Image (spheres, helix red, strand yellow):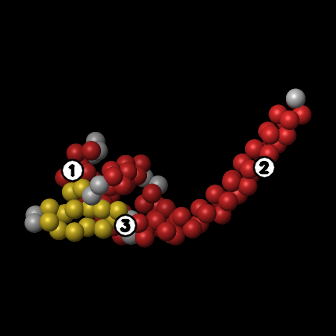
Amino acid sequence: MDTVLQALADPSRRALLEILRDHPASAGELAEALPIARPGVSRHLRVMRDAGLVEVRRDAQRRIYSLRPEGFVEVDEWLASYRALWSNRLDALHTEIARGKRTKR
């Protein structure tokens, strides 16, 4: 999971993932979307591929990148306990707000 979190820590990589969330894209298309040189984009894509976040397939001379949802599962499971914590706290807050509104009437 540390490898995935390190890959997600970089803002350029997160920007690439947001693009890939919408549709698969070639390395060239991804490079056009960021203000960094194409070799830098290639390095970011390699880091994300090594972390299991993206996969690549060849289409003639192009490499097409797409998200690999399985790569996010471990982080999602780790975050689930924090989601539950906040959900419980927000439910309690909602209850207190509702009580306050009843008291004011």
Name the quadrant containing residue 48. bottom left
Q: Who's the residue at 40% across and 52% down the image? A: 14
Q: Is residue 98 left or right of residue 23?
A: right
40 over 79 or under it: above or below:
above
Q: Is residue 78 left or right of residue 69?
A: right
Q: Provide the residue designation for mark 1.
A: 29
Q: Residue 17, how many percent across, how many down? A: 37, 55
- Which residue type does callout 1 highlight? Glu
Helix, strand or loop under label 3: loop
Q: CA distance from mark 3 to mark 1?
A: 18 Å
Structural crowding at the residue carrying mark 1, measured as other residues with C-alpha within 10 Å and reported as few (<14), some (14–19) or many (≥20): few
Give residue 2's mark: none
Q: Who's the residue at 10% across and 66% down the image? A: 60
Q: Provide the residue designation for mark 2.
A: 92
**Does residue 43 show up?**
no
- Which residue type does callout 3 highlight? Arg
Q: Is residue 95 left or right of residue 3?
A: right
Q: Provide the residue designation for mark 3.
A: 68
